[in-house]
Image (tube, rainbow, N blue to C red):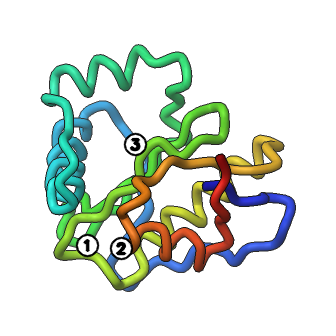
Amino acid sequence: MRRDLTRPFPEPVWPEGIALVPFAVSMAEELHAVMQDGYGQNGLSVPPYADWRARLLSDPEYDAELFFVAQAADGAFVGFAHCWNSSFLKDLVVSPGWRRIGIGEALLLRSFQACRNRYHPYLDLKVDRVNNGAIQFYKKRGMVPVK
């Protein structure tokens, strides 16, 4: 799917008690657990932590400034969005217990901002064709299917 970043979109609004915090490698293991929890509910597999971390940090598309972390007031990491330098949203995940309060939307809109600020005209992502909930979520925020 693709979002035209030259078209207007709203500013992210963070739910009460949720803050956007900068990514640090020291968070990686906890964020991997968020990904396992979030993706596992959809039947998706996540590589083991050591493999995921090694691939993340060695990927030429990786930039810590494009890794957005949502943190609850109690310090728990509850979601994240990870964009590549090429304006591709690699991962967007919210812990199941924290869904439907606006975290995913705020992370997605922050991703739009970051890529637009780097002068990318669009943001792309891949979503499984059978994941209707995710497809509707993205469409509602201006994304359209592309081949």
Residue sitting at 66 percent across and 41 percent down? 87
Measured along the vertical axis of the image, is residue 119 above or below residue 92?
above
| Left or right placement of residue 114 versus residue 44 in this view | right
Q: Nearer the viewer, residue 133 or 107?
A: 133
Residue 12: quarter of image: bottom right
Measured along the vertical axis of the image, is residue 37 above or below residue 144?
above
Q: Give coordinates of residue 132: x percent, y percent.
A: 40, 71
Amino acid type, label 1: Ala
| Left or right placement of residue 70 versus residue 68 in this view | left
Q: Give coordinates of residue 129: x percent, y percent.
A: 43, 58
| Left or right placement of residue 13 versus residue 11 in this view | left
SS at badge 1: loop
Residue under label 1: 73
SS at badge 2: strand
Residue sitting at 24 percent across and 46 percent down? 31
Badge 2, how many Cα within 10 Å: few under 14, some, many 20+?
Answer: many
* N-terminal-most mark, 3 or 1: 3
Residue sitting at 13 percent across and 29 percent down? 48
Q: Nearer the viewer, residue 117 or 60?
A: 60
Amino acid type, label 3: Phe
* N-terminal-most mark, 2 or 1: 2
Badge 1, how many Cα within 10 Å: few under 14, some, many 20+?
Answer: few
State the separation of the CA atoms marked 3 and 1: 16 Å
SS at badge 3: loop
CB atoms at circles 2 and 1 under 8 Å apart? yes
Residue under label 3: 23
Q: Give coordinates of residue 107: x percent, y percent.
A: 49, 63
Residue 17: quarter of image: bottom left
State the separation of the CA atoms marked 2 and 3: 15 Å
Residue under label 2: 18
